[in-house]
Amino acid sequence: MRTLVLIRHAKSDWGNPGTPDHDRPLNERGLRDGPVMAQRLRAAGTMLDAIVASTALRARTTAGFFGDALGLTPELRTDLYGASPRTLLAVAASSGADRVALVAHDPGMTALAGRLSGGGIAAMPTCAVATFRWDAEGWDIATAIDPDAWSFDSPR
């Protein structure tokens, strides 16, 4: 069984236009939504082996909420910053985990969620969580076929 959880980072703060994009923190809503969504994923009974996050501050902070809720320490990867759907899947497959969450950015997250859901997920708003499950032994098989099940949750 393979599980992929896509988590788009929580809402970031655009209040300081001089802040580089990579260093933007979460805003008040993001700081509120992150822990709520992490607890909702935990309450849904989703089990994970790993959380892998973009190195961007907003993604690292969001991943921390999910790590705290699920008892995991997120791994940070520079290649998740602005990652394409292909890169997102490659990172999941190379994580060494059967059940992995990726915390990253749009447009890659929406594109991948839309593809894996057969168009059922049209957008990944900030702090949205999309979960995909395959009854497959390896990521090479899982990423080549449609998931057996998927779900979507959003703070909005």
Image (cartoon, grey):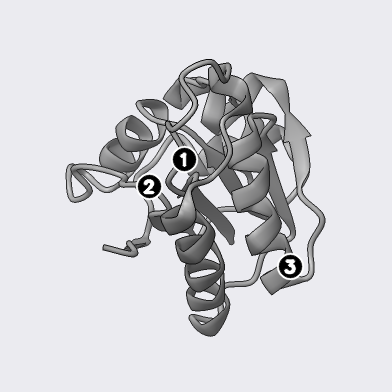
Residue 6: where, in percent of width, then height? Answer: 48, 48
Q: Which residue is mark 2?
A: 126
As helix, strand or loop, the secondary structure at mark 1 comes to loop
First in sequence, mark 2 or 3: give its number. 3
Q: CA distance from mark 1 to mark 2?
A: 9 Å
Instruction: Say which quarter of the image contains residue 148.
Output: bottom left
As helix, strand or loop, the secondary structure at mark 2 comes to loop
Question: Which residue occupies 65% across, 35% down?
Answer: 57
Residue 93: where, in percent of width, then height? Answer: 65, 36
Tell whether 150 sits left or right of 71.
Answer: left
Badge 3: residue crowd in 10 Å (few <14, some 14–19, many ≥20): some
Is the C-beta separation of discs 2 and 3 under 8 Å?
no
Residue 155: where, in percent of width, then height? Answer: 34, 64
Residue 50: where, in percent of width, then height? Answer: 73, 54
**Residue 80 circle label:** none
Instruction: Say which quarter of the image contains residue 70.
Output: bottom right
Is the C-beta separation of discs 1 and 2 under 8 Å?
yes
